[in-house]
Amino acid sequence: MLAGLLRTGVGGRQLIQGWRRGVSMSGALRCEATDGEEEEGQARKQIDPAKDRTRVIPVETSLKYMQSEAYQTAYGDDPVWKKYKRNFKGQFPPKKTRKLCIRAGVLSTGNPCPVCRDEYLVLDPRNTALLKQFISPHNNGILPTSITNLCRKRHRELEVAVQQARDIGLLTYDVPFRRYNYQDYYPLASSSSSSSTTASATSSSSACLRPPLPLLVRNVKMARNTTTTTTTTTTNNNNNNVHDQNINKTSLRLNTRGSH
C-alpha cells in the first residue's frame, strides 16, 4: 500500500506525512490523558479528610452520637442550628439559602449548613431526637430555612424524613380543628316537636355530639324572648280586665244615683 502511494507522486507523500503526524498527535494526547489522570489521583489524595463526605454514616452510628459526650460538648442542650451563623454579602441576608454544600463528595464551601458540617448528623425517620430540633413547639410545623439556615437540599431531606416519621408513628402531630354547622345535621330544640321518636333520636345524638356554644346561647336567647312575650301578654290581659271591672263599677253607681 505504501509503495503504491509513493508511486502516485506528491499527493501520496503528503498523505503519508499526514498519517504519521496523526499517529504522533494521538500518542501525545494519550500521554496528556494519563498525566491528567495521575494529577486527579494526586489531588484526591490531597483532599482534607475533614471535608471528605464520601463515607456513608449509618443511622445507628448517628443515634449513638446523639447520646455521646462529644455531642454534648459540641452543642449542649441547644439545637444544632442555634449557634450557627450564616455568611452572606451585604447588610441583609438573602431569602433563600444555598442549593447544596457538598459537591462530588467534598464540602464546596467554607461555611456549610448545620447538618452538612457534621457528618454524623443523619436525617432519618428513626433519628427522632434530631428531627424534633427542627419542629416548632407552637404549631408543630417544620421550621423554615430562614431560622435553621439549612441548605435547600438538606431541607428537602428533612421534610421527607419528618413526613415518614409521622406516617410510621414515631412523631406525633396535631389534627387540624374543623368547625361544622350543626344545624345541617341536628335540628334546634324549638323546631324539634314533630314526634317522640324523632325527639328521642335527637336527644341521643345531641348527647353524643353537643352543639357548639353559639347555638346554645341563641337557644337561650330565644327561650328568654318567648318567656318575656308571654309575661307581657299576661300582664296586658290582666290590665284590660281590671279596666273593664272599673268601668262596670262606675256605670252601676251612676245607675243607682239616677234611680234615687
Image (cartoon, rainbow, N blue to C red):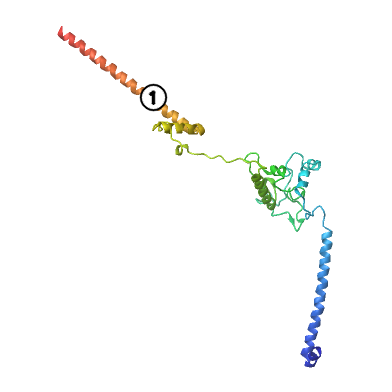
Residue at 82% across, 76% down? 27
Where is residue 194? Give x, y as percent.
39, 33
Q: Amino acid at mark 1?
A: Thr
Q: Which residue is mark 1?
A: 228
Q: Which residue is most to the top? A: 260
Observer-nearest residue: 223 or 228? 223
Could you say which quadrant of the image residue 43 lies in? bottom right
Q: Which residue is most to the front? A: 197
- Give neighbour class at mark 1: few <14, some 14-19, many 20+ (Cα, 10 Å): few
Local SS, label 1: helix
The quadrant in which the N terminus is found is bottom right
Q: Which residue is most to the left? A: 259
One can see residue 143 in this view: no
Question: Is residue 62 depicted above or below 30 in this figure?
Answer: above
Question: Is residue 182 depicted above or below 107 in this figure?
Answer: above
Where is residue 195? Give x, y as percent.
39, 32
Q: Is residue 201 left or right of residue 112?
A: left
Q: Is residue 240 left or right of residue 226?
A: left
Could you say which quadrant of the image residue 240 lies in? top left
One can see residue 160 in this view: yes
Observer-nearest residue: 202 or 14? 202
Where is residue 44? Give x, y as percent.
82, 60
The quadrant in which the C terminus is found is top left
Question: Is residue 259 depicted above or below 220 in this figure?
Answer: above
Q: Is residue 229 left or right of residue 127?
A: left
Where is residue 37? Give x, y as percent.
81, 66
